[in-house]
Amino acid sequence: MLPVLGLLLTGVLFLARVHTEAGETRALARRCALAHAASGCQEVPAGCEAVLRGTRAERDDQSRQAAESARAGAATSGTLVDQLPIIGDALEGLLGTTTTGEVRRQVPFTPQMEAQARAEDPEAAVEAEVGGSFSVLCDPRPESPAAQARRVMCNWLPCGG
């Protein structure tokens, strides 16, 4: 009976660690995304460089690269999928920009759980992955419709000063 209680306690403690780590990852993702949104998606908060993904600058760079390859005569199939970057830019201009914070962490198994996993499969993973993500609109300073149209079109066509 005592070994069963010991194993049960080990399992409960492991689940508590997993739950705690999951909460911390969600909180970090949320904090970074909200701080980034508060700056109008212009500044990456300290300690959030690896957490944030899909920032406005990255999307603008991807859109410019797609536009430059199209202007350079890169082969396209002409489908709607090929035109998605400009559609995405237009929707972003109308609805605002989003930013997403995403965090993944590993929680190691307890020694008893690791021993059991290794006994069944020597190559088995001996940790659990927890993660959290949070997306938020982040353009609190809206542009005029003319400025939105100019920004979207200048990603695709050469614009002067």
Image (tube, rainbow, N blue to C red):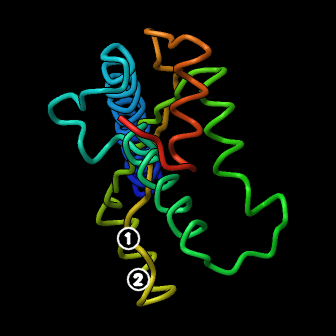
Looking at the image, tell me whether mark 1 or mark 2 is earlier in sequence order. Answer: 2
- Taking depth in this image into account, of 40 and 80 the one nearest to the observer is 80
Q: Position of residue 62 (x, y in %)?
A: 48, 56
Query: Mark 1: few, some, or many residues within 10 Å (few <14, many ≥20)?
Result: some
| Amino acid type, label 1 | Val
Q: Residues within 10 Å of mark 2 (few under 14, many from 20)?
A: some
Residue at the disc numbered 1: 126
The answer to the question of whether label 1 and label 2 lie on touching residues, with beta carbons closer than 8 A, is yes
The quarter of the picture where residue 67 lies is bottom right
Determine whether 79 is above or below 153 in the image: below
- Residue drawn at x 45%, y 9% is 140
Residue that lies at the very extreme toward the left in this rendered image: 46
Q: Secondary structure at mark 2?
A: helix
| Residue drawn 39% across the image and 27% down it | 33
In which quarter of the view is residue 110 placed?
bottom left
- Tell me the quarter of the picture where residue 93 sits: top right
Residue closer to the observer: 83 or 27: 83
Q: Residue furthest right?
A: 79
Residue closer to the observer: 153 or 134: 153
Residue 89's tag is: none
x then y, percent, for residue 31: 33, 22
- 143 sits left or right of 113 in the view: right
Q: Helix or strand or loop: what does disc 1 sit on? A: loop
Mark 1 or 2: in front is: 1
Separation of marks 1 and 2 at Cα, in angstroms: 8 Å
Residue type at numbered disc 2 = Arg
Q: Residue 24: where, in percent of width, then height? A: 33, 31
- Residue receiving disc 2: 118
